[in-house]
Image (spheres, helix red, strand yellow):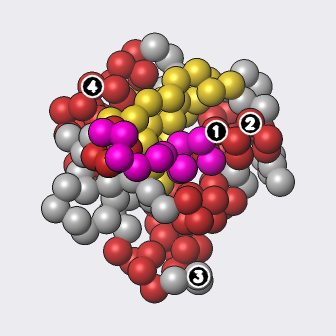
Amino acid sequence: MHVRVGILTVSDRAASGTYEDESGPLISGIINRRSGWRISRQAIVPDEIDDIVTIITSWCHEGLDLILTTGGTGFAPRDVTPEATLKVIEKLTPGISEALRQESLKITPHAMLSRAVAGIRQGTLIINLPGNPKAVKENLDVLMLVLPHALEQLKDEGGTETTHRLV
C-alpha cells in the first residue's frame, strides 16, 4: 500500500532553533523502518494554533494519508496542538487516543496528562503524539499495530476483514 505521511513538530524552541527537534526525525525513522511508507512532508512550527491549522489543512488538501504531530499536547499554557487539531478534523477517532493513553499509563502515571486527539479530515488520519522522544517511540509501538488497517479502511482497500501487523 502506498502511504504518504506528514510529520509536524510543534515546538516554540525547535521552531526558533534554540532546541534540536529529536521527535520528528525519530518518527520519520520508525515509519521508514517499520512500514516503508514515504515521508512526503516534514515541518516544525511554533505553538500557534493558526500555524498548526494552516499546515495540517494544507497537507490534507495535498492528499497525505497520515499526519503525525509531535509536541504541544500537555498542560503548559502554550500547548495548543489538540485545540488546533480539533479545528481541522471532521471525524474524531477517540479509540486511538484512548489506546495510546492506556498503554502509556502502564509506563508512567503522567500519561493521564496527555490531551492528544486523533481524527480524520478528507481521508487523512491525523494523530497527535507527545513531544518526548521516549514517549513518541512507545506510542508508535502501539500505533503500528493498527495503522495499516486504519489506512486501508480510509482508502477503502481491503474492507474490514484485512488485518496487518508491522513489527
Chain-order first, disc 3 or disc 1 = 1
Q: Is residue 141 left or right of residue 127?
A: right
Dot 2: within a 10 Å radius of its alpha carbon, few (fewer than 14), some, or many (20 or more) residues?
few
Magenta residues span 16-26
Instruction: Please name the amino acid that badge 2 sits on.
Output: Asn
Q: Is residue 41 visible?
A: yes
At 44% across and 75% down in the image, what residue appears?
111
Closer to the camera, 138 or 123? Answer: 138
Seen in the picture, residue 150 relative to 136 is either above or below; the reply is above
The residue identified by callout 3 is 107
Secondary structure category for the residue under label 4 = helix
| Spatial separation of the CA atoms under disc 1 and disc 4 | 21 Å
The residue identified by callout 1 is 28
| Spatial separation of the CA atoms under disc 2 and disc 3 | 25 Å
Dividing the picture into quadrants, the one containing residue 134 is bottom right
The residue identified by callout 4 is 54
Instruction: Please name the amino acid that badge 1 sits on.
Output: Ser
| Spatial separation of the CA atoms under disc 4 and disc 2 | 25 Å
Closer to the camera, 72 or 142? Answer: 72
